[in-house]
Amino acid sequence: MTTSSSSNPTACVLIIGDEVLSGRTQDANLKFLAERLGQLGIPLGEARVIPDIEAKIVEALNACRKEYTYVFTTGGIGPTHDDITTACVAKAFGRKVIRHPEVEKKLRAYYGERTNEARLRMAEVPDGDGVSLIENLISVAPGYRIDNVFVLAGVPSVARAMFEAVAPTLRGGPPVYSQSIDAHVREGDIAAGLAEIQAQHTNVAVGSYPFMRLDKLGTSIVARSTDRAGIAAVIGKVEKLMRGLGADPVVGPAPV
């Protein structure tokens, strides 16, 4: 459900890497990107985990860059053979891959005698107009932007630094706020009432998430919207619904 005004831009995140799909690496970028984009008023509409397969990466890029205002990729721009994101981005845009001279110079200065062809792969970007580097304050190799696609590193600290470097350039809308309310009530017991509340507040996304605490089932309700008054109204009605079932709900901090 769309929680922002129609004027809000939207975003998609493509997490690239077999290591995430295998479970060997736990992604740590999605939560950060979703929260930061929401703060900027750019709701995250979709996230995909893509294997290191050229056709699948190209397909996802071309589909998502048409549907969303911004697309952020993470992973696949390192020095190894399976770092194929740049080649895939270039193919999606019908470009060739070149070695950026400025980046190559920095890499050679940084690595010195340890410079090799593998490390110089991190200087590769698509050719042509509209490609700009994304500063990397953590290490030397930058990310880059091409049109509405932002290519970030997979290492969380580097991805975050890159995102913060481009954040001031993004067109945002009203921030997306959220507030939660938890209680030891079962989802099935509040489903009907919750549906009525959602129908009454179409500008607020109402999410229901079960939990187990102290060996007791419960439900956490999260209200998300650009309208803080709407969130407050929803939380108030959910609290009343939960108390009507004999629960003692805990309301999270109001959005600020």
Image (cartoon, rainbow, N blue to C red):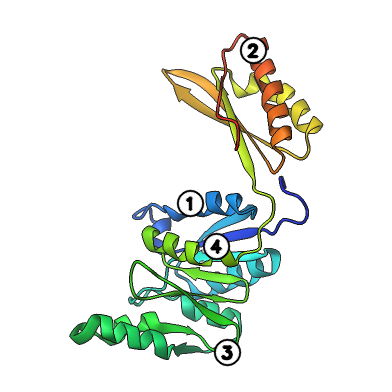
Q: Quadrant where the N terminus lies?
A: top right
Instruction: Find disc 1 in the rendering and name its residue.
Output: 32
Are the two marked residues, 3 and 1, in contact with CB atoms closer than 8 angstroms?
Answer: no
**Mark pair 4, 1: CA separation:** 13 Å
Residue visible at 43% across and 88% down in the picture:
100
The relative height of residue 135 versus residue 218 in the rendered view (above or below) is below
Label 4: few (<14), some (14–19) or many (≥20) C-alpha neighbours in 10 Å: some
Q: Which of marks 4 and 2 is nearer the N terminus?
A: 4
**Mark pair 1, 2: CA separation:** 34 Å
Secondary structure type for disc 1: helix
Q: Position of residue 250 (x, y in %)?
A: 55, 20
Q: Earlier in the sequence, mark 1 or mark 2?
A: 1
**Mark pair 4, 3: CA separation:** 23 Å
Residue visible at 54% across and 52% down in the picture:
36
Label 3: few (<14), some (14–19) or many (≥20) C-alpha neighbours in 10 Å: few
The kind of residue on which mark 1 rests is Phe
Q: Quadrant where the C terminus lies?
A: top right
Residue 167's mark? 4
The kind of residue on which mark 4 rests is Ala
Instruction: Find disc 2 in the rendering and name its residue.
Output: 243
The relative height of residue 175 versus residue 196 in the rendered view (above or below) is below
Q: Earlier in the sequence, mark 2 or mark 3?
A: 3
